[in-house]
Image (spheres, rainbow, N blue to C red):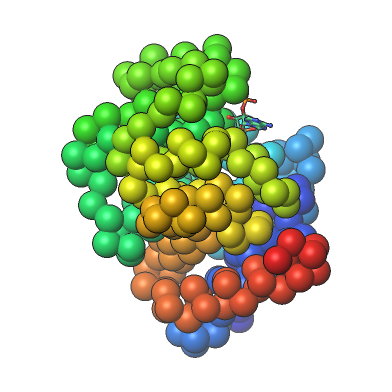
Amino acid sequence: MYDVYGIIGDPVSHSLSPVMHNLAFRELQIKAVYGAFRVKKEELLQAIEAIKVLGIRGVSVTIPHKESIISYLDEVSEVCRVIGAVNTVVRREGKLVGYNTDWIGVMRAFEARGVDLKGKRVVIIGAGGASRAVIYACKKAGVSKIVLYNRTWERSRKLAQEFALEAKPWEALDQAEGDIIIQTTSVGLKSKESPISSETLKNFSIAMDIVYLPLKTKFLEDAEKRGLLTIDGLQMLLYQGVEQFKLFTGLEAPVKLLEEALYDEVKKIEKELKLG
Ligand code: ATR
């Protein structure tokens, strides 16, 4: 008997999670398979019932269900409530339990590059769902200061209030400064755009992007040219997946192997989409 896992979301056809989890199952000789299940926004409740009835052992959750799934699960971890999102569901004694590993992905991506977040001054661009996981990770890691910039002021003001941080107007982004800058908006996804001028990036020493298509976004390309240490979006994806695998199986995933497979896969997608 093979255990079944999968990802639920819409779209999921280009998801890299099946690549990661299936490879890890194979490498560790675990009898399990991981599929991609397209579940439309209005089909979430049915999908949850299906997970229960079919005995699916665990799922990754992606757009558009990360927030709305919270109210349908039997239990969710405290972190999910703070971040407001679930990206992992595991069946435990018949109950569906929600977790969030996105923030751990952010933290471990920095660790893997030898960056200690403790005491650092961080600037975050964006105030959406991804930004919340990044903020949580930064706080947990003990950064000394977070300044938030978002196109829509009301959204950053609210987020800043909720997490007790500073928000500055979008128009002031050119004067941003600090140790680390983290790009959490969708700007640069499948395009050659960056939300910040290349000139401003010289006020920082480390840049992270959560966008991974293309792998080298305009933001990271500019940062690299300015001599910053850069961390691409695939690192966060890799480490949130590694943590998710641990929740699914209780085992450590073969990180290096998964990393290589992820980079290969993204390069293929870049070629397909002519983004390289
Ligand atoms: P996610 O969950 O991926 O963070 P989201 O909640 O839709 O997605 O948030 C998207 C983020 O990208 C927001 O911060 C959004 O800014 P607004 O709050 O002003 O919408 C930001 N964003 C998207 N397109 C943008 C653009 N063209 N310029 C600047 N910011 C943009």
Q: Nearer the viewer, residue 184 or 130?
A: 184
Residue at 34 percent across and 21 percent down: it is: 165
Q: Quadrant of residue 175?
A: top left
In the picture, which quadrant includes the N terminus?
Answer: bottom right
Q: How many marks?
A: 0
Image quarter for ligand 1 equals: top right
From the viewer's perspective, tell me whether residue 273 is left or right of residue 156. Answer: right
Residue 152 position (above or below residue 2): above
Q: Is residue 77 visible?
A: no
Image position, residue 245 (x, y; %) = 46, 66
Q: What residue sits 40% from the left and 42% below the top? A: 202
Locate the C terminus and report the quarter of the image it occupies: bottom right
- Does residue 218 appear in this view? yes
Please, is residue 240 above or below residue 63 in the view?
A: below
Q: Residue at x 33, y 64 (%)?
A: 112
x, y percent for residue 224: 47, 56
Q: Is residue 36 left or right of residue 262?
A: right
Q: Is residue 179 left or right of residue 37?
A: left
Foreground residue, 217 or 260? Answer: 217
Q: Residue furthest left?
A: 119
**Could you say where residue 241 lies in the image, as x and y percent from the top left?**
49, 62
Q: Is residue 72 left or right of residue 209?
A: right
Whether 177 is drawn above or below 58: the answer is above
Whole-percent x, y for residue 39 in the image: 76, 48
Q: Quadrant of residue 140?
A: top left
Residue at (23, 52) in percent of width and height: 116
